Amino acid sequence: MQQGIFTIVSNRPVSGATYEMVLQGDTSAITAPGQFINIKLDGFYLRRPISVCDRNDSTVTILYKALGKGTEAMTAFAPGKELDILTGLGNGFDVSKSGEKPLLVGGGVGVAPMYLLAKELIAAGKSVTAVLGYNNGGDVFYAEKLEELGVRTIVCTADGSIGVPGFVTDGMKEVEDYTYLYTCGPEPMLKAVYDACKTSGDFSFEERMGCGFGACMGCTCETKYGNKRICRDGPVLVKEEIVW
Amino acid sequence: MVNTKVTLCGLELDNPVIPASGTFGFGYEFAELYDINCLGTFSFKGTTAEPRFGNPTPRIAEFSGGLLNAVGLQNPGVDAVIAEELPKLAKCFHKPVMANISGFSLEEYVSVAEKLNACEQVGWLEVNISCPNVHGGGMSFGTDPAAAAMVTKAVKAVTTKPVIVKLSPNVTDIVAIAKACEDAGADAVSLINTVMGMRIDLKKKKPIIANRTGGMSGPALLPLAVRMVYQVYDAVKIPIVGLGGVSTAEDVVELMLAGATAVEVGAANLVEPYACRNIVEDLPRVMEKYGIKNLSDIIGGAH
């Protein structure tokens, strides 16, 4: 973990209530896709944990949905504004387990960490398929960006307006075989993906957090290997350890 | 040069700054960030006889002046604390540590105290009779003077370490509880633990926290802590460890003026991981600003 001041480079809506923010600063503590950053916002006591969508040596990109007052306030932030951010939080996905044909399943803002993950897997020469789920056609974001990376991308919408009608599990039926599964999304989706998953996999969970770095025990869950803090020992749990 | 040293129950602290139990784990997360030996000491995660998972999630909610938690005393149990946590801690913290203990029965407090009494690393026992987030223990001992005295006496009987009894603000008369603890032999009292509160999710129209209620902490609590420390200082002769909403060196000085010998910092650690180090580093500047040479001289100075 590292604390640093980041400057907003851009902050724009990418669809519906979902925004993309690019931040410039020291990104060296971010070591794996699936990790998150924790942002201090003026007027709010707790930091806002948001997963990393992309990074390079000097910028980090996040996608966030304006759901509560904190994220709503973020939508008004202008380029040039400085933010106090903790980076390099959480374990992240283990790319070494992917095999040759990894499957990535993201739902809603859970699509965000799939981007950096896909980028790293493609760079490693893997044949990557992504199933992305959204509520409706107007919500779709980053599907084209994943395609541009060379990822076979299957979009699913609950309202059926774009791509496969239904949920990510409907999209997963179109994928013949895969060597490992990576997923991030709301818990009911993770459970459905777990039940449909034919291989082992990395599952990224969400929980209300206090600190985001393992001190407060606010986000503990039970696993087959003992209690784990979603913020510190997670957010990624392997399929075999998950207790629903 | 200013002098930040204070003495708490016979043990000298380099400064009065103490991360509060439940906000600092067993120290390692913070030891990765800074040398935690800069602290006066710290109070480790509340420990019970058996391992506890704690409450279901969500355990955390927020408000403009801080946060609410209902972790529910998650801890690995006293035997694991002694076998695993304390040896790990010894590698990164070389000062006496404050052992925070909890129980659901008198026997549990006694057995945990007895075991930790045998640990050389432990400087003080902080006896939590004020956790608002567990049922059938914790705070139920801290809201009645007779029960508070009973726990104090029982723990004192099995330890040679100084016993600091941690008090709840969720009472009509905290002074009466503090006096009962003093009369029962407490070496110090620490106050205040969290204030019981609740937040409701407007979309779900249900309490945010699974436990429904949670303990409030954060800057909103400082005036309440100052008032209660001030009142207790008037009524007891034993030292007071002050806490509640402390996030700056100025807050430390204020609680000491109210009557605190040392000051714990809780919620601030969770949003600003360097909070305690920053307070320690800023203390000399604040002391100079207010003409304080020896920090220990100002204890109770507002009376």
Image: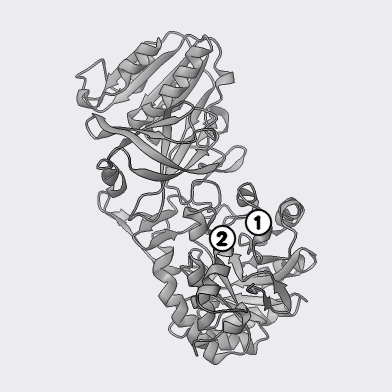
Which x, y percent locates residue A128?
45, 12
Residue holding disc 2: B276
Residue holding disc 1: B36
Above or below for B301 versus B37: below
Residue contact between numbered discs 2 and 1, judged by CB atoms under 8 Å: no
**What is the number of the mark on residue B232?**
none
- Residue closer to the observer: B220 or B148: B220
- Residue closer to the observer: B63 or B303: B303
Which x, y percent locates residue B85?
71, 53
Q: Evaluate whether residue A193 shows in this view.
A: yes
Which x, y percent locates residue B28?
65, 50
**In the drawing, does residue B150 fall left or right of residue B303?**
right
Above or below for A54 versus B135: above
Q: Chain of mark 2?
A: B
Please tell me which residue is depicted at 39% across the width and 59% down the height of the picture: B212
Q: Chain of mark 1?
A: B
Badge 1 element: helix
Badge 2 element: helix
Please rate how many residues cluster around mark 2, counting C-alpha atoms within 10 Å: few if below 14, some from 14 to 19, many from 20.
Answer: many
Which x, y percent locates residue B40?
65, 67
Query: Residue B297 appears in which quarter of the rendering?
Result: bottom right
Name the amino acid, label 2: Cys
Task: Give the CA distance from mark 2 to mark 1.
Answer: 9 Å
Q: Are marks 2 and 1 on the same chain?
A: yes
